[in-house]
Amino acid sequence: MSEKVIYVKNLVKKFGSFVANDNLSFEVYSGEIFGFLGANGAGKTTAIRILSGLSKPTSGEVSIAGFDAYRQTEQIKKNIGYMCQKFSLYEDLTVKENIILYGGIYGMSKLLIKERMAGLLAKLHFQKDENRMISDLPLGLRQKLAFSVALLHEPKIVFLDEPTGGVDPITRRQFWETIYETSSRGITVFVTTHYMDEAEYCDRISIMSEGKIVALDTPENLKKQYNAASVEDVFIKIARP
Amino acid sequence: MKRFLGFVKKEFLHIFRDYRTLFILFGIPAAQILIFGYAVSTDIKNAGVAVLDVSHDEITQKLTDKIFSSGFFKRTETLLNYNDIDKAFKKGKTKAVIVYEDDFGKKLISEGKASLSIISDGSEPNTATLITNYTTSIVNDFSMEISGPGVKNLVKISPEVKMLYNPALKSHFMFVPGVITLILILICALMTSVTITREKEFGTMEVLLVSPLRPIQIILGKVMPYFFLSFVNVLMILMLSWLVFGLPVKGSIVLLLAECMLYILMSLTLGILISTVSKTMQQAIFISLIGLMLPTVLLSGFIYPIENMPKIYDYVSSVLPPRYFIVIIKNIMIKGTGFMYIWKETLILTVMTLVFIGLSVRNFKIRLE
């Protein structure tokens, strides 16, 4: 089995008396596409904030890319990428400026930024557009670019928080091809989504409900276990018992 | 550090790329200064004045010359009898008429007193008062000049009110400090609160927070360009009021600039505080405009003196930072006083800044949790 890049054991996060994450335990391996599902308010966001070093667990063991979530949040932040639903690029900056900005924030040298930028633009067939404003780009392109920018510093794990919200099916499909390509390079993709058909594309999925992980397995196994035709059915069976 | 500089550069790009931001930063202050200085100006210049001189002697001639050589008035016509006064006003160009009594010169020499009346157009009360005041002042001047030891009480007219610290009665001397106060707090608080809530709204804030940049670096990086530009703004306003209105800074310019920096800092922290309590840009704009502009204009002593307000407004205004800055800036610019006289206000502003920083940090932490 490959390296564990996310290791969570008995994670508990409380806000006062409210338990947002109740004893979570799971592992994610390098190069894996891990789907993190759950209804709104199930505790997904809280868990992601802890995994990305934004907030600290109340108790339990959490290690991300080999770094401890209590003490080494700085190291964690350097080793993860993040992209959210809103694409996280500045609309009033050009493609190039956005890339330079993010490279700089992650402490990359000018030379390295230049080198990676050239590679990135070539891969997206984007060389001609490097001086275009983000606001001039179609949604699908922006999304691909945002994903590439999130990978610019070559993180071990990339968190995608509902990355395909509001995007048409064809673009979504293309985006998932990029995700596959990324995982084949050994980068772990940790993705939350509300689209159940996307959950089928994941290597493994976990489903959260009321702060607990209630199911965790490959989509195939879950479908068998719950005797369901699709992940959507599994989800509905779990969410409404 | 390098990370931080890249981030600051990006913030400058945001500002320079958005012409609306630039306009708010530099266009509005310049316009405000010019509007308040000129349009709202309560100075008079070339006001039409007519003369009815039935006495027509050497002294009245001299006094009339003196009045018109002051530059405030323009002679519209010379009237011959009392019936012409009404006509002159109706033509519209004449705002006031100076009427000498019969045998003005003769009476002055024999009795030591003479009188003239200044009849002004009451339909424009503001101008009327000013013309009356100006003329009175000139007449008094004149009586001093020609007064030998024996001549007292040359003319019987109400005594003029001389304005201390503003002998020329220039109204923009009063407006410029007020405008600086208003503009700085508005722009700094508005701009910072908007720029931070914009990141929240566009979702880029999450990305920044997840990045290795520390929250304090994010906030400083966003605020620093505005600190710099606001300071440039102060310099611009001072230059503009000096070049256009000839307004000098009587006190120490270093002290003035230092106090401006403190005030800018206070306004920026206020902006950060506003951004921690507002979720959208609209909310931030609303709070900044309604919450800051109206109280500053109405209650800070910018236009209406605090002494004349009911006690309750006095209390309300005592929590407004502009109230203290107006005192500071007026003292330095117009009276030329030193730090000794404004340390209290400075201390209050410093404490306010610290409180705003404290509250912002607290709110920010709650949000992160």
Image (tube, grey):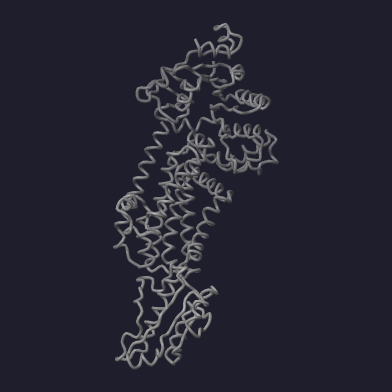
Q: Quadrant of residue A128?
A: top right
| Total marks in image | 0
x and y percentages locating residue B116 in the rendered image: 40, 83
* Residue B271 drawn above or below residue B115: above
* Residue A67 drawn above or below residue B275: above
Q: Answer whether residue B46 is visible to the viewer in this image.
A: no
* Residue A133 drawn above or below residue B311: above
What residue lies at 58% left-to-right and 33% top-to-bottom?
A87
What residue lies at 56% left-to-right and 26% top-to-bottom?
A162
x and y percentages locating residue B201 in the rendered image: 52, 37
Q: Answer whether residue A169 is visible to the viewer in this image.
A: yes
Q: Which of A200 and B48 is in front in this view?
A: B48
What residue lies at 47% left-to-right and 43% top-to-bottom?
B284
* Residue A214 drawn above or below residue B271: above
x and y percentages locating residue B244 in the rendered image: 50, 68
x and y percentages locating residue B51 in the rendered image: 48, 82
Q: In which quarter of the image is the C terminus of chain B?
A: top left
